[in-house]
Image (cartoon, rainbow, N blue to C red):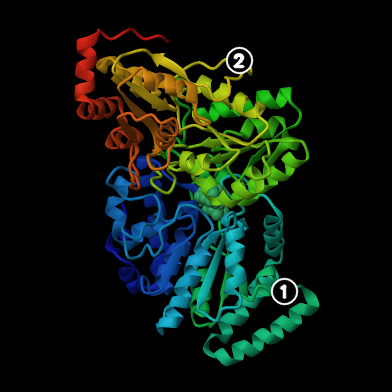
């Protein structure tokens, strides 16, 4: 099926091929990507779009000595396949299998670990400058999409690189798409550059011809710039100090390879603008690159199919419905997303309230400060953001929102373990990094209905509040139609037992209830990591011999720490066990398996408690039989 591809076990093999065979290789590679993603699920459209670019880069550059740094890294499947990992593609994103992103510990060809966007130019510049400092003759190449290019960090790196004398090449992979259609002035600008195609191709021919005479090239470039000054303005990237080349067709190896070969011999920061199509070569993905951005398993002949069994409502959908309902009721509501309309459940809101919908691009820092500005003017901003991406905007949270005590609601999706995307995407730290910020509150709904109600509670407050909820579906609790709120900073006893109490924060309430049924212990649904329901906590502490805290977040500094601090403050000493994510990064894999690995499923919770508190449990059993559930 893949006769040529099967002979390529490293880029060194690829570089031995005659150029005439590269097109066949690229075709086989594309078919292989489609086949393997259809079997495992994963990113598809972006990978189909980088097939030729990957072949060309490994063909022209001496990888891994020359460094390829991919931005985000969700488009690196062709790179993985060409760099000795073809046969392991069936294990992609599964426990113990290949990561869906580049990882330094996976391959020498993965020069920089990534998954959050817009880091590639900084990292590649660091590598290029390190090579210079160490006297090593190697290139560093950053490959960045037009979506990722819109982030501030990419521009910080361009700003720095343009005045650095180093061998850096930035390849802009312009497919005119982020996950959803791209936004912003940069996008408009790139479209303008595209419309100047004739000029660009003429310019490339000039470079090609001048390849054998580098000094002449410099002269020609000066003349060209001069000439350009009279006809078209220099590109933005030239003004940043880069030599801009392009745009060229990123699916045409006959353009890519000679251009890259020319660039390879040029000194100083180079910028190559490559135009590709997301989903290239698979008609269904070309027609709907959004749906095929990150599909699950599917049959390539049929394409994505609607499941016949009705799916459980996800927390993302709960948020999306709440947002529309609250927007209906309150015209001050504005919804803000940093380029995650689909993932954050905002498609319907966008359709129904376009004038109150703000996709600000991949720009989490800006999203948070932009929300702060709107809140200053009396609007009610709701920032929908994945827990992991809020990490990007930490100073903005403190400096722009919390110090000014502005009423911004943060809807934190993907809080806790996320499964196949792995450690880079896990929402492990939000409780810990939010609860230490004055004025900030943090709600942890245990199920779908609580999520809806706590979003309303958050919206009622006159200060910043984050509501954190996990990826996917929860216990399956039906959501109310209305917009009633739960009381602020109040928990509830969910099961009255004896001996010890489990204080659950968030969706782990449900495995805690299962474990408690076997152990005969009390379960408290704490609901708020900040402020804690201290009155309830003290009451529970007084009536139990030990306490167990439980959260899908890091143990260090998390909600369990909050409980320990509150007890210490009250002068109460109680034997305690903190259950949550240990001080290690979680791998990618099936979410249920990962949770079990962390000891956070019902069996793990039961085991941890019975091991640690055997005596407390025995004493409680001897004293009285366990009481029944109260909820
Ligand atoms: C900091 C950060 N925010 C959001 C995301 C989610 N995300 C992953 S890919 C992507 C779109 C990237 O668009 P582009 O760079 O143009 O690459 P393409 O998918 O079009 O190939 C986004 C928003 C992320 N990975 N990192």
Which residue is at the far right?
Answer: 230
The residue drawn where x is 38% and y is 56% is 28
Q: Position of residue 440 (x, y in %)?
A: 58, 38
| Along the viewing direction, whichever of 369 and 79 lies nearer the viewer | 369
> In front: mark 1 or mark 2?
2
Q: Nearer the viewer, residue 552 or 420?
A: 552
Point out the tag, 1 or 2, that comes first from the N-terminus: 1
Between 490 and 145, the residue placed more toward the observer is 490
Q: Please say if 416 is above or below 548.
A: below
Q: Total number of numbered labels?
A: 2
In the figure, residue 417 lies in which quadrant?
top left
Above or below 204: residue 525? above
Mark 1 sits on what residue? 234
Q: Is residue 310 left or right of residue 82?
A: right
Visible residue check, residue 298: no
Q: Give the numbered dot on residue 481.
A: 2
Q: Residue at x 76, y 28 (%)?
A: 331
Judge the density around disc 2: few (<14), some (14-19), many (≥20) Cα neighbours within 10 Å.
few
Could you tell me which residue is drawn at 42 percent across and 53 percent down?
A: 30
The answer, for residue 164, to whether it is visible in the render is: yes
Q: Is there CB contact under 8 Å for labels 1 and 2?
A: no
172 horizontally vs 571: left or right: right
Quadrant occupied by the C terminus:
top left
What is the secondary structure assignment of the residue under circle 2? loop
Where residue 69 sits: x, y (%)? 45, 64
Residue 7 in percent (x, y) is at: 27, 63
């Amino acid at each position: 099926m893949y006769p040529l591809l099967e002979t390529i076990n490293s880029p060194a093999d690829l570089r031995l091929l005659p150029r005439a065979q590269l097109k066949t290789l690229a075709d086989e590679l594309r078919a292989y990507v489609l086949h393997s993603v259809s079997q495992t699920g994963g990113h598809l459209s972006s990978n189909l779009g980088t097939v030729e670019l990957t072949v060309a880069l490994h063909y022209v550059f001496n990888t891994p000595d020359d460094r390829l740094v991919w931005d985000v890294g969700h488009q690196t499947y062709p790179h993985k396949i060409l760099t000795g990992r073809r046969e392991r593609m069936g294990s992609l994103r599964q426990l113990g299998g290949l990561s869906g992103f580049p990882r330094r510990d996976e391959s020498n060809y993965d020069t920089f670990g990534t998954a959050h966007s817009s880091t590639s130019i900084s990292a590649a510049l660091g590598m290029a400058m390190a090579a210079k400092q160490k006297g090593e003759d190697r290139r560093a190449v950053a490959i960045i999409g037009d979506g990722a290019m819109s982030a501030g960090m990419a521009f910080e790196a361009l700003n720095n690189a343009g005045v650095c004398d180093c061998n850096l090449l930035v390849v802009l992979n312009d497919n005119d798409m982020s996950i959803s259609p791209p936004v912003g002035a940069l996008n408009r600008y790139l479209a303008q550059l595209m419309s100047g195609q004739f000029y660009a191709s003429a310019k490339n021919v000039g470079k090609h011809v001048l390849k054998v005479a580098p000094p002449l090239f410099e002269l020609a470039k000066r003349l060209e710039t001069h000439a350009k000054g009279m006809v078209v303005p220099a590109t933005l990237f030239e003004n940043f100090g880069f030599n801009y080349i392009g745009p060229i067709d990123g699916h045409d190896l006959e353009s890519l390879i000679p251009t890259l070969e020319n660039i390879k011999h040029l000194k100083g920061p180079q910028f190559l603008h490559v135009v590709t199509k997301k989903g290239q070569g698979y008609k269904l993905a070309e027609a709907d690159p959004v749906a095929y951005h990150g599909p699950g398993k599917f049959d390539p002949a049929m394409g994505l199919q609607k499941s016949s069994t009705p799916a459980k409502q996800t927390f993302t959908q709960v948020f999306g419905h709440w947002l529309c309902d609250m927007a209906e009721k309150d015209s001050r509501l504005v919804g803000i997303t940093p380029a995650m309309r689909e993932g954050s459940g905002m498609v319907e809101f966008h359709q129904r309230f376009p004038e109150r919908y703000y996709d600000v691009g991949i720009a989490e820092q800006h999203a948070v400060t932009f929300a702060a500005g709107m809140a200053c003017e009396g609007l009610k901003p709701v920032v929908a953001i994945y827990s992991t991406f809020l990490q990007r905007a930490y100073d903005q949270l403190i400096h722009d929102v919390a110090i000014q005590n502005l009423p911004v609601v943060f809807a934190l999706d993907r809080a806790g373990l996320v499964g196949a995307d792995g450690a880079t995407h896990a929402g492990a730290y939000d409780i810990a990094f939010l609860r230490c910020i004055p004025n900030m509150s943090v709600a942890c709904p245990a199920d779908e209905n609580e999520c809806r109600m706590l979003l309303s509670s958050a919206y009622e407050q006159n200060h910043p509040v984050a509501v954190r909820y996990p990826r996917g579906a929860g216990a399956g609790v039906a959501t109310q139609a209305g917009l009633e709120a739960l009381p602020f900073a109040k928990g509830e006893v969910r099961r009255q037992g004896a001996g010890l109490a489990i204080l659950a924060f968030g969706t782990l309430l449900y495995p805690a209830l299962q474990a408690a049924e076997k152990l005969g212990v009390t379960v408290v649904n704490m609901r708020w990591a900040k402020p804690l329901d201290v009155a309830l906590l003290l009451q529970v502490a007084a009536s139990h011999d030990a306490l167990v805290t439980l959260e899908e977040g890091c143990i260090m500094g998390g909600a369990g720490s909050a409980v320990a601090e509150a007890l210490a403050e009250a002068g109460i000493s109680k034997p305690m066990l903190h259950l949550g994510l240990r001080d290690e990064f979680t791998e990618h894999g099936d979410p249920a398996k990962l949770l079990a690995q962390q000891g956070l499923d019902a069996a793990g919770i039961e085991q941890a408690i019975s091991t640690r508190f055997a005596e407390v449990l025995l004493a409680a059993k001897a004293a009285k039989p366990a009481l029944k559930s109260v909820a």
